[in-house]
Amino acid sequence: MNTRSSRAPLSMVIVGAVACLALVGLLVVSVTVGVLMYRGGETGASRTAGPVETDPGETDPVETSPDEPAGELILPPGVAEDQPYLELSSSEDGPVVDVYRDFLCPPCKDFQRIHGDDLIGMALQNTITLRVHPRPMLDDTSTPPGYSSRAAHAAVCAYAQNPEKWFPAEIALFDHQPGNEGLPDHEIIYLVSEATGLDIADCYESGDYHVWLQDVVEPEAQRAVSGTPAVLIDGRPFTGDMGRSGTLKQAIEEA
């Protein structure tokens, strides 16, 4: 038997098997590398293509500022363009009394309780020129912000229909003054409508006078007084005891 001839085919078989294994290994490596490259490209694309989805409950809040109202300046009836107050009474020879208040201000509620009847009485008798400045000063302190503006706007809506209805509107709003949580719109509308006998819903929902409150009333108040409540008698600050009944009336009568 020829040993060399019998070993040659076996050697060729071994060499062929090794070559096949090498080829399979190369294919496996190629496929693995390709998959990794694909996944890497897909991840990179996901980082750059399109916005990242977020939890709907974690959306950024819309920043609004009561100091920058949007819209057209609409004036309450009888109010001049640069007039930062509502004139509730007029007297030819009596003093001019400017009252600055905010419906969310607790000391303003006390002021109303102590001096409100005196001011209303003098106004209805036209012995003074009474000017009320409904400030939205504390808008940022309520949650949600804006209660001072909303309450003031409701009272202005009552004034717009009948100036004398300002008085019952302000009494109702101070009598039901909330904490910093404020009151919802429907409660404000109900309080003022019930107190005045007027339907202020359409006016209130229109928001017509918010720009006037923010752009005309508040800037002048910031220049004229340091806070609320504040009273000017013929342009001079009242410095008497606001916590004692009759002091303001006496100062007005002596002016």
Image (spheres, grey):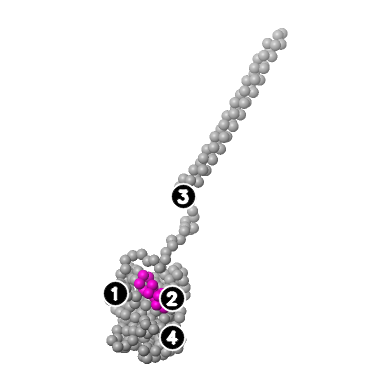
Residue type at mark 4 is Thr
**Nearer the camera: disc 3 or disc 4:** 4
- The quarter of the image holding the N terminus is top right
**Which element type, helix, strand or loop, lies under badge 1?**
loop
Mark 3 or mark 2: name the one nearer the start of the chain. Answer: 3
Residue at position x 29%, y 86% in the image: 91
For the residues labelled 2 and 4, the Cα–Cα distance comes to 22 Å
Give the class, few, some or many, for how many residues have Cα within 10 Å of label 2's Cα (few <14, many ≥20): many
For the residues labelled 3 and 4, the Cα–Cα distance comes to 60 Å
Residue type at mark 1 is Ala
For the residues labelled 1 and 2, the Cα–Cα distance comes to 26 Å
Mark 4 or mark 1: name the one nearer the start of the chain. Answer: 1
Quarter of the image for residue 31 reads top right
Magenta run includes residue 217: yes
Between residue 53 and residue 196, name the one nearer to us: 53
Residue at position x 32%, y 80% in the image: 87
Mark 2 or mark 4: name the one nearer the start of the chain. Answer: 2
Residue 135 appears anywhere in the view:
no
Would you name the residue on which mark 2 appears? 104
Query: Residue 116: x, y in percent?
Result: 39, 85
Would you name the residue on which mark 1 appears? 80
Residue type at mark 3 is Pro
Query: Residue 247: x, y in percent?
Result: 42, 89
Would you name the residue on which mark 4 appears? 239
**Which element type, helix, strand or loop, lies under badge 3?**
loop
Tally the numbered discs: 4
Residue at position x 62%, y 26% in the image: 22
